[in-house]
Amino acid sequence: MSHLLSIGLRHGTDKADAHHTHMGVSYLDVYARYFQLWTTGVTRVLEIGVLNGASLRTWKEYFPNATIYGVDINPECEKHEEDRIKIFTGSQADPVFLQAVAEDAGGFDIVVDDGSHVVEHMLISMGALWGRTRKFYCIEDTGCTYFPAGKDWPGMHLNDEIPLNVREDFEKVFLNKIRKLDHGDGGLQAVHFHNMQVIFEK
């Protein structure tokens, strides 16, 4: 068991549950592959989607020198603020809001998008934050991009409207990043695909 997985299990994050585990490998096991050499050097982590705060507390313990930033559309998530955890209330589909968060933080070493899982929202967030991300930009639950979003998804009832999920728009981002990677452009080292996870490594 990875150190990150043991921390996540203790805090109760869903990144280690059966739904987020494939062939015995959880989201946290995947992250451990890429993050384990950076644990003490990471100083700023942003997670889009706070829910019960368990993932933020997991990152806080795993990255002992980092401030953990959470973004969520639900203002009730602010109750999960604590030492080294800061919560901002707003929509991941609002680039001005996200840029203000990035400005406040001074950029991020790692961004994890576990927000609405709506393609349009994901792309807006990535467009706003990519230039303020230093090492890893991660998108979770990509399997949701094949299906229509519903009001029963966490926090979705707080959105004014729910755009259609257009998987083809999502795939264009991959193709564009891979094309740049093949030409040594864009400061990208690798694109890592896992079950329902994509990690862009700078």
Image (cartoon, rainbow, N blue to C red):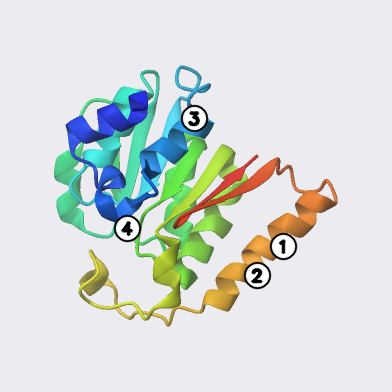
Nearer to us of marks 4 and 1 is 1
Q: CA distance from mark 4 to mark 1?
A: 28 Å
Picture layout, residue 8 above or below residue 113: above
Q: For marks 1 and 2, give the CA distance.
A: 6 Å
Report the residue marked by disc 2.
172
Q: CA distance from mark 3 to mark 1?
A: 25 Å
Going from N to C along the chain, the mark reached first, 4 or 3, is 3
The answer to whether one can see residue 118 in this image is: no
Q: Mark 1–mark 2 contact, CB under 8 Å?
A: yes
**Mark 4, residues whose alpha carbon is within 10 Å: few (<14), some, or many (≥20)?**
some
Q: Which mark is residue 176?
A: 1
Q: Secondary structure at mark 2?
A: helix
Disc 4 vs disc 3: which is toward the camera? 3
Of marks 4 and 2, which one's residue comes earlier in the chain? 4
- Whichever of labels 2 and 3 marks the residue nearer the N terminus, that label is 3
Mark 1 surroundings within 10 Å by alpha-carbon count, few (fewer than 14), some (14 through 19), many (20 or more): few
